[in-house]
Image (cartoon, rainbow, N blue to C red):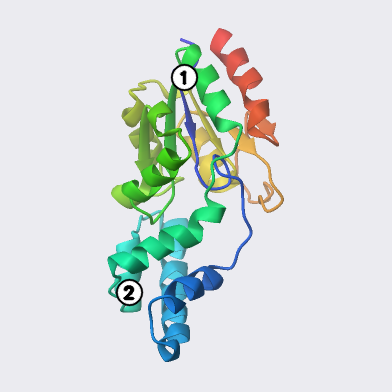
């Protein structure tokens, strides 16, 4: 059957990894819309809310939304604040320049392209990013954890991503991500092949029982030869 689909993680995979402080992001957003004496308290509340939601996703594999983070922090966001939030994240969300060529090559080989992201952001938010970078129309399907009950590494998250691209056999699917537990171990446990993209903040495979990737790459330009080898097997 070869390779039916390649499914990609988003942050740190389709978009290059960025080291940043969440509080700095929220401080920029809040300072544009709140009274000065309310900024730091609101920033602290939003950071605490996001930290708790990410903890829940990591430890309990339960999903969350940005709306939930705002509710936990006691913030009612205006449309203007949400627009500023998107704009503030823009420098950190640009799609890797290798992606359009890679997606074109996969599609030429009849391979479906999907996305599976652990995210609190909405589908609309992500689609704005992909549309801005001219790759939205190249996706056959996408699953954002903000829309389903689970986060990676839960097997149901990977099955949802397969369903989104119309793939039926996990053994014919490849997952590409940067995180050893959420992405690589999760994909392998669900029966998919897994490729890890390495960057400076990627954690090593130092947890007992973690499954190593089928391939390790340092740049998306290195992915296609691995997929071609499995596709022709």
Identify the mark nearer the N-term, 1 or 2.
2
Counting every numbered tag in the picture gives 2
Left or right? Give the position of 170 relative to 214: left
- Residue 176 versus residue 84: which sits nearer the camera? 84
- Residue 167 versus residue 77: which sits nearer the camera? 77
Visible residue check, residue 162: no
The residue singled out by tag 1 in the image is: 172
Visible residue check, residue 88: yes
- Which x, y percent locates residue 172? 47, 19
- Classify residue 83 by image quadrant: bottom left
Residue in the image at 54% along x and 39% along y: 14
Residue in the image at 40% along x and 29% along y: 139
Query: How packed is label 1: few (under 14 Cα within 10 Å), some, or many (20 or more)?
Result: some
Residue in the image at 49% along x and 16% along y: 3
- Classify residue 134 by image quadrant: top left
The residue singled out by tag 2 in the image is: 72
- Residue 77 versus residue 203: which sits nearer the camera? 77
Give the vertical position of 91 relative to 104 (above or below): below
- Which x, y percent locates residue 88? 49, 62
Contact between marks 1 and 2 (CB within 8 A): the answer is no
Marks 1 and 2 sit apart, C-alpha to C-alpha, by: 41 Å
- Which x, y percent locates residue 71? 29, 72
Q: Secondary structure at mark 1?
A: helix
Give the vertical position of 117 relative to 90 (above or below): above
Residue in the image at 43% along x and 75% along y: 32
Give the vertical position of 176 relative to 229 (above or below): below
- Which x, y percent locates residue 219? 68, 35
């Amino acid at each position: 059957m070869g390779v039916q689909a390649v499914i990609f993680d988003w942050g740190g995979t389709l978009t290059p990894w960025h080291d940043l402080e969440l509080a700095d992001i929220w401080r920029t957003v809040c300072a544009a819309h709140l009274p000065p004496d309310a900024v730091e308290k609101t920033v602290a509340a939003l950071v605490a809310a996001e930290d708790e939601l990410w903890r829940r996703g990591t430890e309990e594999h339960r999903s969350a939304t940005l709306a939930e983070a705002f509710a936990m922090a006691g913030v009612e966001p205006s449309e203007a604040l949400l627009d500023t939030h998107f704009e503030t994240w823009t420098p950190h969300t640009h799609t890797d320049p290798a992606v359009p060529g890679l997606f074109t090559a996969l599609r030429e080989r009849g391979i479906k392209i999907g996305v599976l992201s652990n995210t609190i952001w909405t589908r609309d938010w992500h689609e704005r990013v992909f549309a801005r970078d001219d790759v939205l129309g190249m996706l056959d399907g996408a699953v954002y954890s903000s829309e389903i009950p689970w986060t990676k590494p839960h097997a149901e998250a990977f099955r949802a991503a397969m369903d989104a691209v119309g793939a039926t056999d996990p053994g014919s699917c490849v997952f590409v991500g940067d995180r050893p537990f959420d992405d690589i171990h999760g994909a392998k446990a669900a029966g998919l092949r897994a490729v890890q993209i390495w960057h400076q903040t990627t954690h090593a495979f130092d947890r007992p029982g973690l499954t190593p990737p089928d391939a390790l790459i340092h740049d998306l330009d290195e992915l296609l030869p691995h997929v071609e080898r499995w596709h022709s097997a």
